[in-house]
Amino acid sequence: GGVVVTETVFGWPGMGRWLFYAAIGGDMVSVMATTFVFTIVIVTANLIVDIIYSYLDPRVRLE
């Protein structure tokens, strides 16, 4: 949500603005693909953070 605002305020071209214009234009294939990519990135980042956190804090274990 904040990506589109940041790109608009600073005039940066990016994925958020592209996703917004694709949604307005009705390009559902682009909207689905971009949503899928964003989801994969977020899930991967959360997994990496969980793994690193388990190494840094001995009270947390991977099960």
Image (spheres, rainbow, N blue to C red):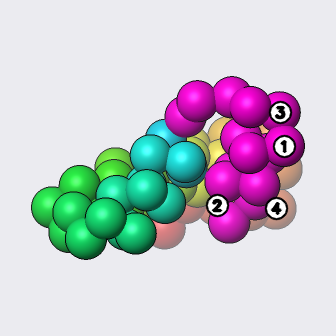
Three-letter code, disc 1: Val
Q: Are marks 2 and 3 in contact (CB under 8 Å)?
A: no
Q: Are marks 2 and 4 in contact (CB under 8 Å)?
A: yes
Q: Would you name the residue on which mark 1 appears?
A: 9
Callout 4: SS: loop
Q: Nearer the viewer, residue 48 or 61?
A: 48
Alpha carbons under labels 2 and 4: distance apart? 6 Å
Q: Would you name the residue on which mark 4 appears?
A: 59
Callout 3: SS: helix
Alpha carbons under labels 3 and 4: distance apart? 43 Å
Dot 3: few (<14), some (14–19), or many (≥20) neighbours within 10 Å? few
Three-letter code, disc 2: Arg
Q: Would you name the residue on which mark 2 appears?
A: 61
Among numbered discs 4 and 1, the one appearing first in the sequence: 1
Q: Quadrant of residue 10?
A: top right
Q: Would you name the residue on which mark 3 appears?
A: 10
Q: Is residue 24 left or right of residue 2?
A: left
Residue 46 on the magenta segment: no
Q: Nearer the viewer, mark 1 or mark 2?
A: 1
Three-letter code, disc 4: Arg
Does residue 27 sit above or below 8 in this rendering? below
Q: Nearer the viewer, residue 60 or 5?
A: 5
Three-letter code, disc 3: Phe
Q: Does the magenta stretch mainly form a helix, a strand or a loop?
A: helix
